[in-house]
Amino acid sequence: MATSETNGNPTAPVPPEAGRSGFPARSMVGAGGGAQGGVGAGARRRKPIFRIGARIGNATFVAIAVAVFVLLGLVWWAATASGWVKPIFLPSPVAVWTQLVKLAGDGTLWADAKISIYRIMVGFLIASAMAIPIGVLIGCFRIWEAAIEPLVDFVRYMPVVAFVPLTILWAGTADTQKFLIIWIGTFFQQVLMVMDNVKRVPPDFIGLGRTLGLPERKILTRIVVRSALPGIWDTLRISLGWAWTWLVLAELVAATSGLGYRITVSQRYFQTNTIIGYILLLGLLGLITDQVMKALERVLFGYARRGR
Amino acid sequence: MTVTATVPKLQLSGLNKSFGRGDKRIQVLRDIDLSLADNEFVSLVGTSGCGKSTLLSIVAGLEDFDSGTLSVDGAPVTGPGLDRGVVFQSYTLLPWLTAQGNVEFALKAAGYGAGERRDIAREHIELVKLTKFANAYPSELSGGMKQRVAIARALSYRPKMLLMDEPFGALDALTRHQMQELLTRIWEEHRLTVLFVTHDVEEAVYLSDRIVVMGIGPGCIKQTFDVDLSRPREPDSASSAEFIDLQREVLRSIREESLKVELA
Ligand SMILES: Nc1ncnc2c1ncn2[C@@H]1O[C@H](COP(=O)(O)OP(=O)(O)OP(=O)(O)O)[C@@H](O)[C@H]1O
Ligand SMILES: [Mg+2]
C-alpha cells in the first residue's frame, strides 16, 4: 500500500495549474521538476521486456501461464506414452482424467471434496476469527504483545505434524481432530502476520486520529483496523493455502472420508491414477480459492491500486 | 476583547524535553520560550536534528514534555485536540477514502452532521482548487494534490491554529511554489495562527510574519526575525532586496549552528 503511494507520483496526473509559469526570482531551483517528466517519456519509446518491472498485457500474461501448463502436460504425456515411465508409477494424463471422470460419475469425488471443503472452511474460519482480534490487540498494545507474542512465536515453531498423534488422542478421528490440526497449523502464523499488518499502519495515521480528537477505541476501529484490512486480507489468502496442506495431512493419517483419505486408500490398491488425479484436484482447488480471494481483494481494496 | 488580545494564542515557557532513559537520556529541547499572537504566521527553521519536529509534536499534543508550560488561549494543553489542526509531511490521507471523504472524515470526528459535512467538505476542496478531483482516491492524486487535500482537511473543522511540519518538503520546486502561493492566499483570506516548520529559508521568509531560528545542543530558540515585508505577498516579493537580505541573515544564523555541530 505504501509503495503504491510513493511510486504513484511520476505517472500521476499533473495538477491543473502546473503549466502556469511566473516565479521570476523564485524559479532558480525549478529545473528539478522537469527532469521527472523525462523518465516517463523515455520509457514509452522503447520497452525492453527484461527491464525490471516492465509491464506486459493481460492476454500475454494468460498466454504464457497457459503455455507453461500445456508444456508440462505434454512432457508428462510423452513420458508415459513412450513407455519411459511405468503406469504404476506415473499413469498417463488420459488415464488420470478417465479415472477422475469415473469417480465424479459415481459421486465419490464430490462426496470427498464436499467433506474436505467443509472441514477446511470450519477449521480456517475458527482460526481466522480468533487470530484477527488477537493479532490486532498485540499489534496495538505492547502489554498484550508481551503476554502473547513470545508464546505464539514459541508454539509456531513446533511442527504441526507432531501434533497429529496428540490430536487423535484428544479428539479421536472425528472432524474435530481435522479442525484442530488446521487450527494449530494456521492460527499461530496468522496471529503474527496480523500483528505485523497492524504494525505497518503509518504512525501518522494514528497521530491524525488523535489530532481529530478521536478516542482510542475509535482510532482502533476506524483507522488502524481499516487501514490494516488489505494486509489482513492478504494474510488470510496466504494462510488459506497452508490450511489445505494441514487438512490433507490430517485426512491422510486418520480419516474415513475426504480427499486425503481417498489418497491413502488408493495407495493400498496401487491406484496411482486416483492419487495423481486427487493431488492435481487439490492443486486446482487451492488455485481457485486463491484466485477468488485475489478477485475479491481487487473489488474490496481497489482504491489502493487505482490508476496503476 | 482587550483581555484576549493580551493573551497569546499559543504560549510555551521554560519547556524542556528529553528522550530515552537512564544513561541514554538525551535532552532535545531546553528552556523553550515562544509565543504566537492571534493570526500570526510563524516559521520554525534550524539545522536538521535541532528538535523542530519534536517541538511541533509537543504543541500538537502528540508528544509529552518534561517540564515547562504549554497553553493555547491561556488554557494548559493536556493532549491533542480539534483546536490545533496538523498537516503532516507524509500527507496522511486515508487511502480508502476519496479526497472529499478524507475531509468528511475529519468533520465527522469533529461532530458535524451528515449534510453539513458534505457541504463544508465540498467548500474546502474548492478552496484548494481540487473540485475536479473530489471523488479521486489518494492513489490517483499527485503529491501536491494530496497535500492540498490534507490542508483542506485541517482547515475544514476550523481549528484555532494550524501546525505544519515541512508540509511541502517532499514536493518538487514548481509544485512547492504553487503550494506556498495557495497557502498565503488562504491565510490572507481566512486569517489563522500558523506554526510552520521548514528547511527552506526562502519559503519561511515568503510566508511568515516572524521567523524563529532554533539552535542545537540541545534545541533552543536562538534568534527571532520579524518579517516586515508588505502583505499580500506576491511571487514577485521574493525578488526585492529586503527579501533577499533577510533570507541571507536567517541563513547565516542557521549556518552558525550547523558549524557548531560539525566542530563538535
Ligand atoms: N522518539 C525519539 N526517540 C529518541 N530520540 C528522538 C526521538 N525523536 C527525535 N529524537 C531526537 O531528537 C532530536 C530532534 O529530532 P527532531 O525530529 O525534532 O529534529 P528536526 O529538527 O525536526 O530535524 P529535521 O529537520 O531533520 O526534521 C534528534 O536528535 C533526534 O535524534
Ligand atoms: Mg523534522
Image (cartoon, helix red, strand yellow):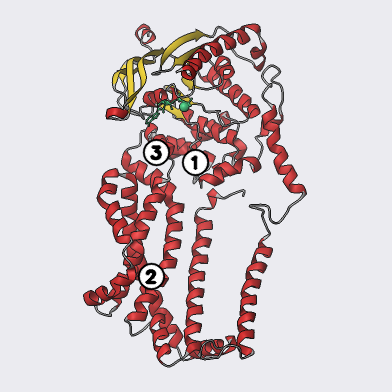
In the depicted structure, whether residue A108 falls above or below residue B159: below
Q: Are marks 1 and 2 on the same chain?
A: no
Disc 1 vs disc 3: which is toward the camera? 3
Crowding near pointer 2: few (<14 within 10 Å), some, many (20+)? some
* Cα–Cα gap, marks 2 and 3: 34 Å
Q: Secondary structure at mark 1?
A: helix
Q: Closer to the camera: disc 1 or disc 2? A: 2
Q: Residues within 10 Å of mark 3 (few under 14, many from 20)?
A: some
The quadrant of the rendering that contains the N terminus of chain B is: top left
Q: Residue at x 43, y 88 (%)?
A: A108
Using the numbered discs, state the Cα–Cα distance from disc 1 to disc 3 in whole angstroms. Answer: 17 Å
Question: Residue under circle 1?
Answer: B101
Residue for badge 3: A206
Lateral position of residue A147 relative to residue A43, left or right: left
The chain letter under disc 1 is B
Task: Please provide percent x and percent y for residue A277.
Answer: 50, 83
